[in-house]
Amino acid sequence: EGVTFMNEPGHMLASQLAAGKGFATQAQVLKWLADANVLFRQSKLPGLGMKSYVNVIGTTFTDFWGQVGPWWHETFTKDERANWAVLDIHWYAAWSGGTCDGRETPGGAYFCDSERSE
């Protein structure tokens, strides 16, 4: 049991920033998540066995592991990571047509809109 403060914060931000646009910075997304978890950390929830599912998605970051990895270790202690802080990474296979669309055997594939009989 636990909470997620925001689903896929900053989704598609990296591509927007690359195009000279964007509604936030990648650092702002990480700060928002860190600040939300300060509230969780200070609440009764960790003591009640609840977890914080810290949701991130690769489309937010230009260098996912280069940005999220160090932030994760700086933001949460080893004890927190072992007990209540859960890194919840979203990734969509269904949106990767032709490169990752259910191919488990050569030539095999499925798509979200395929009939079940296929």
Image (cartoon, grey):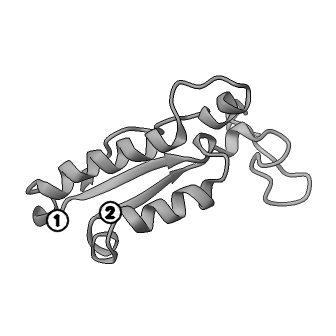
State the image coordinates of residue 31 (x, y, percent, origin top left): 39, 45
Q: Residue at x 11, y 53 (%)?
A: 43
Q: Residue at x 44, y 62 (%)?
A: 72
Q: Residue at x 61, y 60 (%)?
A: 65
Q: Give the secondary structure at mark 1.
A: loop
Residue 117 can be seen in this image: no
Q: Nearer the viewer, residue 22 or 6?
A: 22
Q: Is residue 82 left or right of residue 65?
A: left
Amino acid at the residue labelled 1 = Gly
- Quarter of the rendering occupied by the N terminus: bottom left
Q: Residue at x 53, y 41 (%)?
A: 26
Q: Nearer the viewer, mark 1 or mark 2?
A: 2
Does 93 appear above or below 46? above
Q: Give the secondary structure at mark 2.
A: strand
State the image coordinates of residue 3 (x, y, percent, origin top left): 27, 48
Find disc 1 in the rendering and name its residue: 49
Q: Is residue 50 left or right of residue 56?
A: left
Find disc 2 in the rendering and name its residue: 85
State the image coordinates of residue 106 (x, y, percent, origin top left): 91, 58
- Quarter of the rendering occupied by the C terminus: top right
